[in-house]
Image (cartoon, rainbow, N blue to C red):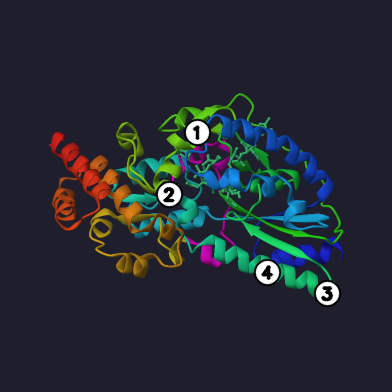
Amino acid sequence: MTLDSLEKFIGFQGWSMFGITPFEKIRKNLKKHEKFFEEWIKKDYQADMDWLELMKKDRFHPERVLPGIKSVIVLGAVYSDSGAMVKRWRSDGGQPQPLHISSETREAQQMRHHRGVVARYARGKDYHKVLRKKLIELSDFLKSRYPQAQTYASVDSGPTADRALAEAAGLGFFGKNTCLINPPRGSYFFIASLMTDLELPETPEKPMPACGNCRKCIQNCPTGALAESGKLDARKCISYLTIENKGPIPVELRPKIGNRLFGCDACQACCPFNAVLPSEVLIGPLKPENGAGDSLDLKGILSIESDEEFAEKFAGTPLMRAKRRGLLRNACVAAGNSGNKELVSYLEALIRQESDEMLREHAGWAIDILNLNL
Ligand code: B12
Ligand code: SF4
Ligand code: SF4
């Protein structure tokens, strides 16, 4: 199979970038990352994401996942663009902004709204499903030429070290915020991979820049979660606290969360490599207008009474990961930080109707903070 025919198919599918790398090259890269990962775990930076360690062997030894593996196709799908930003901002009733407005400015503007902000990666449809479907189509394409070929597809939740694979395939470099950055597209992209036992042509290597002396992400992280260069302490990370964490949010971190309702973009929004965003999200379902959008009305979230009602609103979006309980917990924190007195009655209603102790405690905290600020 030629690189040209693969590139055509991948482009037709809407991926923003791709790289193909022989397994031998990946093996070397994974060795280095396995050591790094072990140091990270030793420091307890993984919080309660024990599944990461449980998957460790498979993540760093893909030959266990696909015996006979020879090549990996790593793909990137941009999920945030300048066009979508402008459109969403207007539909929120804000001032129209020029194209390529810096994402930092917009983030600051959103904080003034009494809404909860959804991180950019979670604004469209659930990327796991959308991208997995594309990987299966790509696998079918390979098998149409080589019927005996074996493949293994993975997006995020699979036993793969996605960023390390993407680095080896030339998709970008590791920033100090731990994200993989692809100049000139920035870091707002998902990583997906297709392993195969086919020997595919390798894509040419490209020179990559590095962060240099910049430390903006470390300085702008609201909770100080970027502990050291390249190491993130998930116990302090707002993305972890509002998505993966099933328990209460530590009281001392709540004021630092602001009105972030689901996930956090602060260490990417301030990054110079994201100052000019790509002009278009190429995979339609990932666009904010096809999912939850960029921010949600806190009154609406605090009023969701049942898991069924929650699923009706958010089925098929990444927000399902937090479940009703997690999202309402986050909404209480965002409400407490909003300075919006109107939310007190919604929080009081939640305490009256809710039997879940964690939610009642978060709502009580928010009321206290709002009353203190009267
Ligand atoms: C667990 C997890 C999280 C955790 C922990 C994140 C973390 N940084 O460790 C939490 C819940 C906090 C999280 C948050 C987010 N996540 Co997440 N997450 C994952 C997941 C499932 C595993 C990551 C992991 O193994 N972490 C452990 C650390 C040690 O590994 P790592 O993150 O890959 O980090 C590497 C770097 O630290 C690197 N490195 C950096 N410097 C140096 C220096 C040296 C010398 C060496 C050797 C290595 C090195 O080596 C590490 C090991 O490979 C991956 C998907 C996957 N299957 O891999 C997605 C993934 C990393 N997440 C992703 C996204 C989009 C996010 C968020 C942006 C979502 C949001 N807006 O809220 C934030 C970003 C926060 C951040 N700054 O990282 C994308 C990142 C895409 C990209 N362009 O980088 C991924 C790849 C999912 C995907 N398939 O698209 N995530
Ligand atoms: S996602 Fe937010 S809290 Fe987590 S490291 Fe980045 S800036 Fe800090
Ligand atoms: S903000 Fe600066 S230090 Fe952080 S990832 Fe971007 S370039 Fe690197």
Q: Residues within 10 Å of mark 1 (few under 14, many from 20)?
A: many
On the question of residue 132 being in view, the answer is yes
Pick whichever of labels 1 and 4 is earlier in the sequence: 4
Can you say whether 305 is above or below 253 in the image? below
Mark 3–mark 1 distance (CA, rounded to whole Å) = 45 Å
Q: Is residue 207 left or right of residue 42?
A: right
SS at badge 3: loop
Q: Is residue 303 left or right of residue 315?
A: left
SS at badge 1: loop
Q: Amino acid at mark 1?
A: Asp
Residue contact at pointers 3 and 2, CB within 8 angstroms: no
Residue 294 sits in quarter: bottom left
Residue on which disc 3 sits: 147
Which contiguous range is marked in magenta?
A: 263-287
Q: Amino acid at mark 2?
A: Ile
Comparing 191 with 236, the one in front is 236
Mark 1–mark 4 distance (CA, rounded to whole Å) = 34 Å
Q: Which mark is residue 243?
A: 2
SS at badge 2: helix
Mark 3–mark 2 distance (CA, rounded to whole Å) = 40 Å
Rendering coords of residue 343 (x, y %): 18, 50
